Image (cartoon, rainbow, N blue to C red):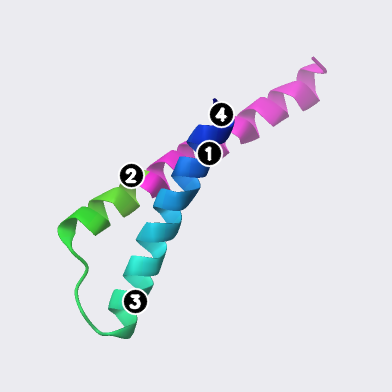
Amino acid sequence: MFGAIAFAYGLLTSFVLSGASRNHKLQRPNPPILVHVGHVCFGCSAALSALLFFHAGRIWLLGS
């Protein structure tokens, strides 16, 4: 189940980044939905990164 979610998240993030890059290259503004989905992807990545960082720190300090 995790593999399917990670794959879908990777595809969505790749689509958002390639669309934003193409719009930047063509000097066009990004559609609002692309901006909102990009913010959601960034927020999910940042939250997961913080959770994993604190979990690793807890394991390192407590040893379990």
Does 47 lie within the magenta span? yes
**Dot 1, how many residues are within 10 Å of its Cα: few (below 14), some (14-19), or many (20+)?**
few
The residue tagged 3 is 22
Whether residue 12 appears in this view of the structure is: yes
Give the numbered dot on residue 2: 4
Mark nearer the viewer, 2 or 4: 4
Residue drawn 37% across and 73% down?
Answer: 21
Q: What stretch is highlighted in magenta?
A: 41-64
Q: How far apart are marks 2 and 4 (CA)?
A: 19 Å
Residue 64: x and y in percent read: 79, 14
Q: Name the spot of residue 43 as percent of width and height, x first.
A: 39, 43
Q: What secondary structure is marked by label 1?
A: helix
Does 31 sit left or right of 63 as displayed? left
Mark nearest the camera among 2 and 1 is 1
Distance of mark 2 from mark 1, alpha carbons?
15 Å
At x 40%, y 50%, the residue is: 12
Q: Earlier in the sequence, mark 1 or mark 3?
A: 1
Q: Residue 54 placed where, x, y %?
A: 62, 30
Q: What residue type is labelled 2?
A: Val
- Badge 1 vs badge 4, beta-carbon distance below 8 Å: yes
